[in-house]
Amino acid sequence: MQRLAFRNQISEKTLFYNRFLWAIIKFMELIGYQWLANALGVSPVHAFAVQSGIGRSRSTTTDGDHRVETYTESYRPGDTFSEHLNFAFRYQGVHLEFLARLYRLPQAREALEQWIAREPTGAYARRACFFYEWLMPTRLDVPDVGRGNYTDALDPEEYVVGARVRNQRWRVNDNLPGNRDFCPIIRRADRVKESEQYDIQARLTELESTFGIDLIMRSTVWLTVKESRASFLIEHEQDKEDRIRRFAAVMENECGKHDNPFAPETLATLQNGILGDSALRYGLRQSPVYVGHAERYQPVVDYIAPHWSDTGSLLSGLSCFLDRTRGSASIVRAATASFGFVYIHPMVDGNGRISRFLINDILRRDGVLPTPVILPVSATITNSTHARAAYEQVLERFSRPLMLHYADQYHFGNDVIGDDGIEYNFHFSGYDDALPAWRYPDLTAHVIYLAEVIDTTLTHEMRAEARFLQANDNARKGVKQFLEAPDHELDRIIRSIRQNGNCISNQLRKRYPLLTEKPGLGERIVHAVVAAFDD
């Protein structure tokens, strides 16, 4: 193969680094994946997790889950396709989206065939050819390799992997966590490893030992409603009480009950339960969808979902992920199911709520969340401005690079009616080109994010709810020493006192004249309430 003309240039829209890493990269002679990207004009949507270049001394610079590696001259690959791809597989890991784009080029096929002919037992050559046939619809015109130890497609020390299936043609263990239609990449950064070891059951046991099983079970009832209310708050529909109750019922009745949460019939059940019987449309969408907002009355597009004709295969791939990773860390599986679904955005309505339902659903089906406990993760997400911003930021890890890459390929134009009856005027010309980005998302940051949300939920949200119920029980007992009344009446009195700055309001005095007619009664009741909640 002829030497490739190399241009040491890099587009900022291709990268998603902070300014510090960007400053380092600008002054490096880049090698590996970025050399191939520049030399062959292949521009992935999502940044390479590792950027490598030649410098004066060997060094590593990290920022979160991204890394810049500087190598000395002795590491420099030759200026050929195979040399730089060999370096990339060896030192930079696997970037499925880029490989899917790279392998579309005719010269890639020729280069791989020549490489495997030169190194028929080479581990990196075999892996490169395996990925070609895994990603592409055609086979390479070379015989099966007959020798060489089996090597893993993904290094299980570096990536979340699926069950091993031997590929005899290339003597490669196919341990990818998905299939060609959908396969997330999750790098086992330190915080991902911590999430894999996170013991949800142990945290629940701690709660039970502190507050007792009866109190935890009682709090679960309210937490289910709280999760529903918070989920609608994310959708800016928190005032729709009937919708909140419907979603709470779905959380309570459907979690962990279906063999495949992404089967069309399951999604229909979830959507019908969430939307009720008064929605305008149901089912999988047959028209475009984007997520956005308005500025000065003009629409701003924040995210574009895949073409509706691809949603079925993407959902099948997401199901394959659950099958191939069965027995793996539940937080990893829940994060992938939830965020993978919301990026596919397959339904005409209810996508966000279903995506958050899936978190509890996966934890329940994996046996780490007992019935009827519901983790109010949406309540944690909406708990503060900072928490909501963190949720938006993790979604932007995928959406921002996508929108930067395709900023000039969508517009609002002629009205069209889709097969689902939806009238739209949003038109996007980049569906086919963007498909590898949707198929092979890097969800490393999403796993880390969900692990933090779950930990906060268990150590703060659920503990606070149990503590409140415990305090309210103690307040009831204290008040009952001076006043006999049904629990719901006592709760009304307790709530009013707390909301009125630990004082008896005029409204409460009118409703219950005995509080003022009997000398000292009101003061004793207030003292009992304050003491219970102070404890």
Image (tube, grey):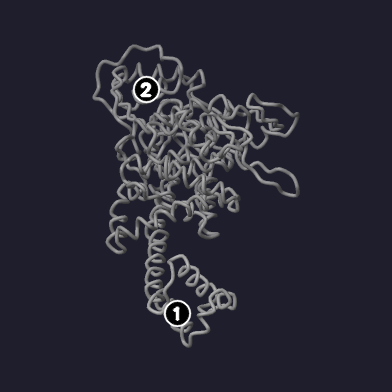
Q: In this view, does 178 lie to the left or right of 235?
A: left
Residue at 30% over, 40% down: 157
Residue in front for this viewpoint, 228 or 442? 228
Task: Classify mark 2: helix, strand or loop.
Answer: helix
Three-letter code for the amino acid on which mark 2 is drawn: Phe
Crowding at dot 1, Cα within 10 Å, few <14 / some 14-19 / many 20+, comes out as many
Residue 525 has which mark? 1
Q: Is residue 83 left or right of residue 403?
A: left
The vertical placement of 217 against 105, above or below, is below
Dividing the picture into quadrants, the one containing residue 42 is top right
Residue 343 has which mark? none
Residue at 35% over, 49% down: 195
Percent across and percent down for residue 90 are 35, 34
Percent across and percent down for residue 6 are 53, 31
Q: Mark 2 points at which residue?
A: 130
Residue at 37% over, 67% down: 470
The vertical placement of 527 against 91, above or below, is below
Instruction: Please state which of the two labelled residues, at mark 1 or mark 2, is closer to the viewer.
Output: 1
